[in-house]
Image: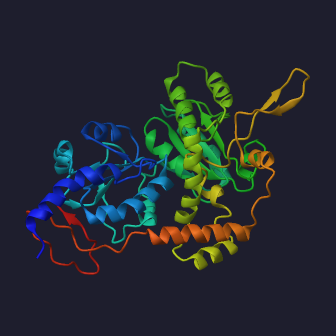
Amino acid sequence: MFDVQLLTLILALTPSLVSAGLFPKDSVVKMLDPKGFRQAIKPNQTTMIAFVAPWCGHCQRMVPEYSKAALGLYPLVPTYAVNCDDEMNKRLCAEQGVQGFPTVKLFPRGKTLPPMTYDQPERSASAFFYWASRRIPDAVKKIYNDKDIHPWVEETSSLDRPRTLLLTKDKKVPLLWKVLANKYKGQLEFASRRDRKGRSSEFMGYEAGEKKVPKVLVYPIGSTKPVMYEGINKLDSLSKFFDSVLDGTADLSMVNQKASEEEFVPSDDELEIERKQEAQRIALAHGGFSDLIDFEEALKNGAGADFHDTHGYGGMMGDLPKKKKVVDKDGKTADAAATPSPDAAAEEDPEPAPSPSVKVEEKAETDKKEDASAPEPPAEPVASAEQPAQASESATERPVDEL
């Protein structure tokens, strides 16, 4: 029989050994204390928070999947974790009604809406990803016909707030647009119209535009004439623009001009996150593939080919911003060097690009390594020294480590 004193010693030492490494240092999941928790749910945004304990076996098995989901949601849905075994966090966990580990909660709109508790039987990356992204409050008016655009503009012109219309090439309303509509609900009126072939753009007097490029139109209060946003279609850029629109202290054309001058210059850390995120979000968007044969077959059938059309890049809508043209002393134009792109990187690197078959083989090796370290099926609840082990649960119940 296992020595109780030894078990007690192990449980006492485990938090200090594991808590720091529960989530990798490069994970986009950030740990919260009570002050950080209050700050995290203060903005009007959707946030996912996992309440965990480092000694909890189910938590340890959940971490890789939760981290993958967080990578897919980044930066649109901030993802956090709270170590409930830390003395300073125990009151917070009790206030949040945490009775077992892990407990994952979604705060749909900061403190303005009650949180939801994850109750699905599966703790997988795809399950977390879809559970969070599909529960962002819907504050976007969907316009299904071109002829309904002008009536919407006229009807909303009497509102005491600006309106903004997205003409998107996507089949669905982009996640970024949903996030922005949730963030600015009551301050801005949001609408969306699918513009797959650019016909809606032409109907409104604009050019059809490129395949992946959406159009954001802003209608000032009381106006039926839009101003087309000229900046980068990413979360922080659009948020900054909308904040300036709502501030009202600057002329909209000046604000738009300033937005158009912004360069997309990601840091090395952002590029690394983007590299990991693209591969992960493709897998999440298609339900994940545990078997290489299934993944290879899906690629052959075109899975992921329209990924960015549907999901955009991390925190963006549509394609990556193009390099801006600069004019030298001789009057010649050239691309600004600030914005890196895959094409530019390819030109700088003389080595031939790997063939699709090589990429699949590399993916195979990666999948094998991931499978080797994949979390095992949920085990029995981990019991503390003061608490006897719980009886095994039924196959339909989701295992949880009790406090």
Relative to residue 45, is residue 367 drawn left or right? right
Q: Position of residue 15 (x, y in %)?
A: 23, 53
Q: Nearer the viewer, residue 273 or 229?
A: 273
Q: Nearer the viewer, residue 377 or 25?
A: 25
Quadrant of the drawing holding the C terminus: bottom left
- For residue 351, say whether it is visible: yes
Where, by quadrant of the figure, is residue 366 drawn? bottom right
Quadrant of the drawing holding the N terminus: bottom left
Q: Position of residue 384 (x, y in %)?
A: 14, 63
Relative to residue 335, is residue 233 drawn left or right? left
Check the image and name the residue furthest to the right. Answer: 330
Relative to residue 302, is residue 16 drawn left or right? left
Q: Is residue 279 above or below residue 381?
A: above
Check the image and name the residue furthest to the bottom. Answer: 395
Q: Is residue 366 above or below residue 253?
A: below
Which residue: 76% across, 66% down?
355
Which residue: 54% across, 26% down?
244
Q: Position of residue 281 (x, y in %)?
A: 55, 59
Which residue: 50% across, 49% down?
178
